[in-house]
Image (cartoon, rainbow, N blue to C red):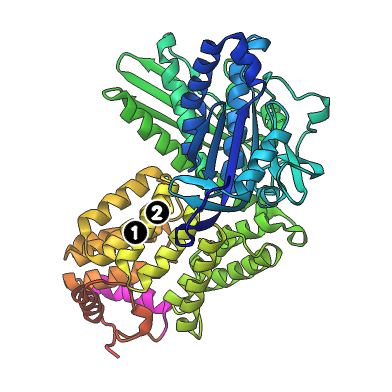
Amino acid sequence: MGKAVASEQVTRRLSAVLAADVVEYSRLMAADEGATLAALKRHREELFDPKITAYRGRIVKLMGDGILAEFPSVVDAVQCAIEIQQGMADHNANIDGDSRLVFRIGINLGDIIVEGDDIYGDGVNIAARLEGLAEPGGICVSRSARDQVRDKVPIRFEDLGEQQVKNMPRPVRAFHVHFEFTDTGEAPAAHGAVPAAPISEKPSIAILPFTNMSQDPEQEYFSDGITEDIITGLSKNRSFFVISRGTSFKYKGTAVDVSQIADELAVRYVLEGSVRKAGNRVRISAQLSDAPVSHQVWAERYDRDLEDIFSVQDEITQNIIGAIAPGIMSAEMQRAQRKDAGHLEVWDLIMRAHWHIRQFNKDDTIKAQGFLRDALALDASNAMALCDLAFASHFEALFGWTDDPAGCFEFFGEVARKAVTADDQYAMSHTAFAIFELFSNRHDDAVRRLHIACELDPNLVFARGYLGVTHAFAGDHDAAMQHFEQAIQMSPRDPLLVIWHIAMGWAAAAAGQFDQAAKFAKQAIEDNPEFTDNYSVLAASHGHLGQTDEAEAALVQLLKRMPGLTASDERLTRPFKRDADRQRFLEGLVKAGLPEG
């Protein structure tokens, strides 16, 4: 009998559902019930639970040998399933064939009914039927799932056609997922063989196991831990495709040929590193290579005291991730600039726009918008393109690079909302909309949304820095400085340093620390002399300090970028939470010589 649910209790939602169970469970139980149950429990606790949690899923229920889980994103569900199956392949490589636990996994994206913590309905039933169609050690997905995952994860799908399954009135279109390892830990059988994949348009990266250079095997856990944390942290950045831990660790202990590994895994970037411990000191070295062209993108060495080994591990991991992301983006922007304009794909268009936006001037901002509109004409729901278009429109409205600042600001908000709708699990989408909330004087809403972004991707410097910006304009100097320091520590060579430094100037000015505000404005000018607000903060600070010559020089540069500016001009509108901070800023500009209007 089905469940009887009062109509007012019925809640429906669209979810990705993952169903898994053990192949030949009855035979395994008959052969050794105790060992089978112990192994099943161990795999659930050590593999399924942490992987599902890492990909923001939740286990709905355990059913004997089966597991039912729900995810807000089908991309996360598929990537989680791949890592689970590869984790099982790693484990089973050393287990006798008759004793192995092998799972089948089915994934569906569909409408489900929610009652308390339980879920049911056709969306769940289809996932269970797909699990039954999967090969041992394999994954089978529905057409709805395939359509959402295709082009976001560089894997190949085999169309199994329409499948008539139990208790379903209509056939289900099923697809087998091809990935790199089966339950034996070896290459797939002939029917599942995958030809070498082309490098995906989205940057792909393999993080190789860091080499333990210490003559101490006990340090192996430390080098492995750094590798695993980098893989986990970087995987949260949706701008990259990161090869799973199970695949990367296949290369542990082998001689590294970066070009060969990149070719085998169809990745563009490879990170390798080493750990050397001596006494209470540790040296971690890392280098990132653009493998197809044998070019070193970035390299760094970190020397630390090991007073708290876990704290050091976290700090180094965060520093490496913070350096990798802008390093890859910089390389991708340069790659796109070298391409023939007539052969630009969506990613190339976004990368060209990225480069122009970061010049922070009117002409480049307009060029960036053109590239982004071309990208969105090819992929209207590309969240990254939408975020960049929102960011470009924000500066266009902010600095008056348009005849209709109000309309441009409204467009900024509209595009930022579309980015969240397109991908609400993409941290940058929430950050873009949080900037719109901030400049709409909804400071508390902006802070809440930026915390959501940081939860989705703790290593997103953009969100961390804009938390500082939001607190700076709210007049909370200490909170602002804390977030700026974290953002700069996470990514000390980031092109966005100009924003963090000038916002530190805003925070200092709001606290009446005009000498510090001028210092930060000068740092921002060193970062990027074209950023307009560098000169407004510098002029206002020198004005308050009574430093006439310096104030006038800064004002000349400001008026060069904002011709005809007066103190009453809307182009000077900034999202101050306290009116006293706004008035103090304008008074400083007037003291510097800006006409009142």
**Which picture quadrant has residue 293?**
top right
Badge 2 marks a residue whose secondary structure is: helix
Direction from residue 556 to residue 141 in the image, left or right: right
- What secondary structure is the magenta-colored segment mainly? helix
Q: Is residue 218 depicted above or below 243 in this figure?
A: above
Q: Residue at x 53, y 48 (%)?
A: 3
The residue pinned by badge 2 equals: 452
- Residue 226 versus residue 259: which sits nearer the camera? 226
Q: Amino acid at mark 2?
A: Ile
Residue 560: say if magenta.
yes
Name the disc covering residue 448, or none.
1
- Residue 363 versus residue 70: which sits nearer the camera? 70
Which image quarter is the C terminus in?
bottom left
- Residue 53 versus residue 510: which sits nearer the camera? 53
Q: Residues within 10 Å of mark 1 (few under 14, many from 20)?
A: few
Q: CA distance from mark 2 to mark 1?
A: 6 Å
Direction from residue 475 to residue 121 in the image, left or right: right
Residue 160: say if magenta.
no
Does residue 192 appear in this view?
yes
Residue 568 x %, y % = 30, 86
Direction from residue 134 to residue 427 in the image, left or right: left
Circles 2 and 1 in contact, beta carbons < 8 Å: yes
